[in-house]
Amino acid sequence: MGWKVTIRTGPRVARERYEVLDQALDAVEAHGRELAKSTHTDAVDVRVKRFDPVQQVSARIELSGPQRLVPKVRGGVDVRGDGSTEAYLGRLQREVVKQRKGESAFSALRRAVSNANEERA
């Protein structure tokens, strides 16, 4: 069991496992910051609509918690085409984690996942 981190960049998928939540969250942050620095896409025109880089998800780092007697905690960080990041909770129905003043997407995810993990335990 343990925490699973899945890194999706285009068609490439990598998976890592961690026993402790803090280690998994550190890995999400490290991968996310690295991808945010190196990921930049151009706008895409699709006949009737234009998608700017901020509207495109160029990489996604997903976090999935252990499922014991409680439902899994799921969330992650989307890295946008302009290098910005956005944290979310959920898997199929993602809920954006609102960042507090001075808080990064990674800190917001850490706060939200820690709270959700405590509530479900």
Image (cartoon, rainbow, N blue to C red):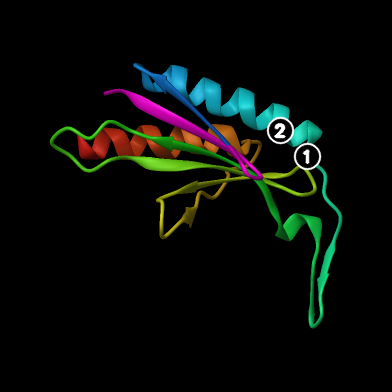
Does 121 appear in magenta? no
**Residue 6 to residue 49: above or below:** above
Q: In the image, 11: left or right of 19?
A: right
Dot 1: element:
loop
Of the 4 image quadrants, the one containing the C terminus is top left
User: What range of the chain is rendered magenta?
Assistant: 1-12
* Main secondary-structure element of the magenta-colored stretch: strand
Quarter of the view holding residue 105: top right
Q: Which residue is identified by label 1?
A: 39
Q: Residues within 10 Å of mark 2 (few under 14, many from 20)?
A: many
Quarter of the view holding residue 18: top left
**Residue 29 to residue 90: above or below:** above
Q: Amino acid at mark 1?
A: Thr
Q: Which residue is identified by label 2?
A: 35
Quarter of the view holding residue 93: bottom left
Does 7 appear in magenta? yes
